[in-house]
């Protein structure tokens, strides 16, 4: 894998094709990268107590490193 954490990349395949972002996490053994603000998934967070409500949180999910290229 030729890209590492902190590199600016452009997505060349998938639903976020053409968008750019910075790599937050690189996992070379699995050939995955997490790009800031791209490949968003919604995660449900349960209410901890009666005072605090549950909520939906958007997180950046990992994508295959072959779908991005360094710029």
Image (cartoon, rainbow, N blue to C red):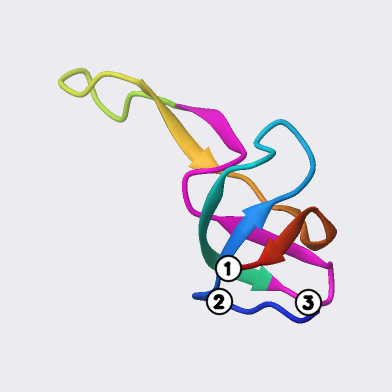
Q: How crowded is mark 3: few (under 14 residues within 10 Å), some or many (20 or more)?
A: few
Q: How crowded is mark 1: few (under 14 residues within 10 Å), some or many (20 or more)?
A: some
Q: Disc 1 on helix, strand or loop? A: strand
Residue at figure coordinates x 47%, y 44% from the top left: 37
**Which region of the structure is painted magenta?**
27-44
The C terminus is located in which quarter?
Answer: bottom right
Residues under labels 1 and 2: Cα distance? 6 Å
In the visual, does 56 lie left or right of 28?
Answer: left
Magenta highlight on residue 24:
no
Residues under labels 3 and 2: Cα distance? 11 Å
Give the mark nearest the N terminus, 1 or 2: 2
Q: Which of marks 1 and 2 is in front?
A: 2
Residue beneath disc 2: 5
Residue 28, label in figure: 3
On screen, 12 above or below 48? Answer: below
Quarter assignment of residue 30: bottom right
Residue at figure coordinates x 15%, y 20% from the top left: 51
Q: Position of residue 38 (x, y in %)?
A: 55, 43
Q: Position of residue 14 (x, y in %)?
A: 77, 37
Residues under labels 1 and 3: Cα distance? 10 Å
The furthest residue to the left: 51
Residue beneath disc 1: 25
Mark 1 vs 2: CB contact within 8 A: yes
Q: Disc 2 on helix, strand or loop? A: loop
Residue nearer the viewer, 35 or 51: 35
Quarter assignment of residue 60: top right
Give the mark nearest the N terminus, 3 or 2: 2
In the visual, does 34 lie left or right of 55?
Answer: right
Magenta highlight on residue 43:
yes
Q: Position of residue 63 (x, y in %)?
A: 73, 51
């Amino acid at each position: 894998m030729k890209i590492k954490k902190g590199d600016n990349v452009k997505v060349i395949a998938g639903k976020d094709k053409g968008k750019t972002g910075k790599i937050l996490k690189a996992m070379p053994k699995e050939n995955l990268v997490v790009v800031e603000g791209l490949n968003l998934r919604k995660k449900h967070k349960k209410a901890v107590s009666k005072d605090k409500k549950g909520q939906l949180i958007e997180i950046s999910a990992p994508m295959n490193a072959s779908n991005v290229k360094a710029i």
